[in-house]
Image (cartoon, grey):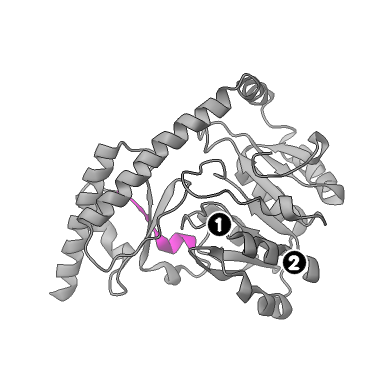
Amino acid sequence: ASQGIQTHPDHILVTSGSQQALALVSQILLEPGDVVLVENPTYNLALDLFRALELKIVGVPIDEHGMQVELLEPLLQQLHPRLIYTIPNFQNPSGASMSGTRRRQLIALADRYNIPILEDDFAGDLRYDGRAQPAIKALDPGGRVIYTGTFSKMLMPGLRVGFLVTEGPVLRRLVEFKRVTDLTTSTLMQRTLDVYVTVGRYQAHLRRSGRLYRQRRDAMLAAIRRYLPSGIHTDPPQGGLFIWLRLPENLSALGLLPLTAEEGVEYAPGARFFANPTDGESFLRLNFATQTPEDIETGIRRLGIAIERLILKNRG
């Protein structure tokens, strides 16, 4: 209920992480050749899943307020997509959050064109600044939104427990498909998590994690300002795990990789997050969640050295 969703236990399906939730929804709703609309950029493993299912992926541009919903209607009219996939909170990889106005516009369009929305809220509880927006599912009286969340990002990646919130025939099909896929998500993991949440440990963990991750985000933003050359752009995220950088147009994130490897720095090249990988040539994603502020400063300083080396290489 932290995202404003009022639901019933009978409308929740426990899954083996949110990746299984994405797979189940895609397999029951979509067929090869169907069009799915995604944010451009978006979660790379969702793109990999959609490609494996032979779907046609169409990217919708984003800005600092999330998916540019005002661009959707012509795509809905021309392409007749079967699903809209969105990460409205602290989007992976950009860190952007969809505005309340756009969330309501998205619901209105889904109702008008009879299209389901898959809302992936992988880190909605990790907010450090600003006011929380209600989940798109919380604004959905018609039941068009399938909401998915996970405990893996909040607690540990090895805890493969996620969930779906939906209702009606879609839920019944999901339950049956889940049953024939893996019978059930680990009951030991479910029981352990239930106890952890019931005694209040999860909420305390969230508060501690929020304070820690905020410090690390701030350390990374400060280091970016201090060590990276001019011409690099980022929009500070209000929460989540990632910072998204745009390099000057003449610099390639893939071309930068060998130089950062020599400096002992890793990042995710932007190409893997776009429906058309060439659109991500100038972007890279940084993760601040797993390093101390001291290591973050060292890493960004080394990243700055690698970027300066690439600039000099291009000039030569």
| Residue at 62% over, 25% down | 197
Q: Earlier in the sequence, mark 2 or mark 1?
A: 1
Q: Which amino acid type is marked by label 1? A: Asp
Q: Quadrant of the N terminus?
A: top right
According to the picture, the residue beneath numbered tag 2 turns out to be 108
Label 2 secondary element: helix
Q: Is residue 248 left or right of residue 148?
A: left
* Magenta span: 266-273
Label 1 secondary element: helix
Q: Position of residue 74 (x, y in %)?
A: 67, 80
According to the picture, the residue beneath numbered tag 1 turns out to be 48
| Residue 26 highlighted magenta (yes or no) | no
Q: Which amino acid type is marked by label 2? A: Ala
Numbered disc total: 2
Badge nearest the viewer, 2 or 1: 2
| Residue at 40% over, 41% down | 214
Q: Position of residue 33 (x, y in %)?
A: 69, 69
Q: Position of residue 113 (x, y in %)?
A: 78, 71
Callout 2: 10 Å neighbours few (<14), some, many (20+)? some
Would you place residue 171 above or below residue 310 in this image? above
Would you place residue 38 above or below residue 289 in this image? below
Q: Is residue 40 left or right of residue 312?
A: right
Residue 54 visible = no
Taking the view exactly as shown, the residue that stands out farthest to the left is 316
Would you place residue 265 above or below residue 73 in this image? above
Callout 1: 10 Å neighbours few (<14), some, many (20+)? some
Q: Marks 2 and 1, how far apart in space?
A: 29 Å
| Residue 267 highlighted magenta (yes or no) | yes
Residues at badges 2 and 1 in contact (C-beta under 8 Å)?
Answer: no
Residue 142 occupies quadrant = bottom right
Q: Position of residue 266 (x, y in %)?
A: 31, 49
| Residue at 69% over, 67% down | 105
